[in-house]
Image (spheres, grey):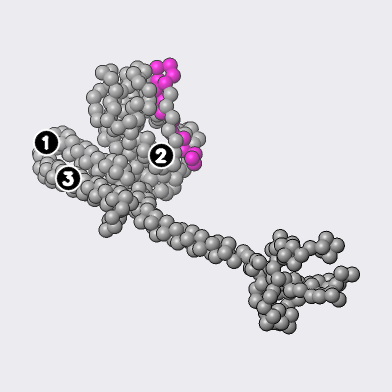
Amino acid sequence: MYRNNLSPQGINEYFNNFGLRPVTNQNLKVSVLEKGAVVFHKTSSLGQFSSIRYNDRYYLYIDNLISNILLESKYSARPNDIFWVIFGAALVLLIYIYISILKSIEPLKQLSGEIKKFASGDMNINCKSDKDDEIAEVANEFDKAASKLNDLISSRQLFLRTIMHELKTPIGKGRIVAEMLPEEKSKNRLISIFERLDLLINEFSKLEQIVSKNYSMQIKEYALIHVVEHAIDLLMLDEEKKALHVELHQNSDINIKADFESFALALKNLFDNAIKYSSDKKVYITTIEDKIYIENFGKALAMDIEEYEKPFVSGKSELKPGLGLGLYIVKNIVKLNNFKMQYEYIDGKHRFIIDLSEA
């Protein structure tokens, strides 16, 4: 600066380019030099240079043999404080938004839990909400739908139980009257008819429980032949008709884990359909290792087997009319017992195969 012959104004402008300005307050100058913290110090041929920090500001002190000068930085020692303030405010805002979102979706989590309970069969749910938002509206509508459905199920069960009770009463009375008949042949025939009716009502009740998923499975180990023989007994055939309509081949004696009553009922439906729709009125039952084969001779099905496995499908005119619940019930019971069922039609013979190996 001396060589360039700069004026005092030029010197100030020169320092100003580096963000520095001379300290003119002598008291401040004394305080900075006495109380300030030296950040760094350098000695050169031009003099001594010190960077001093005082009251969150930086100062540059230049001292040589001719003169000394204290320069103040225009910038604060904490120039990023404003950014930390902004960051803190943004963080608080984000936390507030996050908590608000959690509170807003809390009713949605509760509704999801109630829907899962409802889907698992628990009809006693309550998801009413007194809030005024879209989630509350959905929850209230679902609660109304669940209540209506629960009322319908309850009324259906009451209706069916009442019907079955009313049917059992005359059957019981008819059975008593039949026992009083003097003619043995007529007596046995009537008793057989009433027993058949009673069995059908019990079967209908069990089917209703299975379809409505209110049936409690009792999975235990049984001899397969006992289940098959019980299913044949459910056909209510006397010995003469049993020999005429049923041909049983037991090639192996194995045990299975199943619900005895429901699985026997499924087999009974298959046996009954096989006899009903066969050309020779006969069902052929064969047990080989872990499989049961139910076969009968007859015409090919008019539709794919998947169509007959739907409820209320009885087929075309070549099949006898009925409710069409047979294969639908059988498929559900077999699945509930963890077995698999297959169907094939070969050389004029229908064949249902139940795989008893663990699925």
In which quarter of the view is residue 12 placed? bottom right
Q: Distance from label 2 to label 3 (Cα)?
A: 28 Å
Amino acid type of the residue tagged 1 in the rendering: Glu
Measuring 38% from the left and 25% from the top, which residue is drawn there? 305
Disc assigned to residue 254: none
In the rendered image, is residue 13 in sight?
A: yes
Q: Main secondary structure of the magenta part?
A: strand
| Along the viewing direction, whichever of 241 and 144 lies nearer the viewer | 144
Task: Mark 2 and mark 1 in contact? Answer it, CB < 8 Å.
Answer: no
Which is nearer the eye, 292 or 38? 38
Quickly name the residue at label 2. 335
Q: In the image, residue 105 lies at what x, y percent?
A: 39, 55
Q: Nearer the viewer, residue 264 or 205?
A: 205
Question: What residue sits right under mark 1 in the picture?
Answer: 183
Q: Is residue 240 magenta?
A: no
Q: Which residue is mark 3?
A: 159
Magenta extent: 345-359
Mark 1 neighbour class, 10 Å CA radius: few under 14, some 14 to 19, many 20 or more: few
Q: Residue at x 43, y 16 (%)?
A: 347
Q: Nearer the viewer, residue 234 or 329?
A: 329
Element class at badge 1? loop
Q: Residue 199 appears at what percent x and percent y?
A: 23, 40
Q: Is residue 44 left or right of residue 191?
A: right
Compared to residue 103, the image places residue 340 above or below, namely above
Comes first in the chain, label 2 or label 3? 3
Tell me the amino acid under the disc marked 3.
Phe
Q: Residues within 10 Å of mark 2 (few under 14, many from 20)?
A: few
Query: Where is 342 relative to 195, above or below?
Result: above
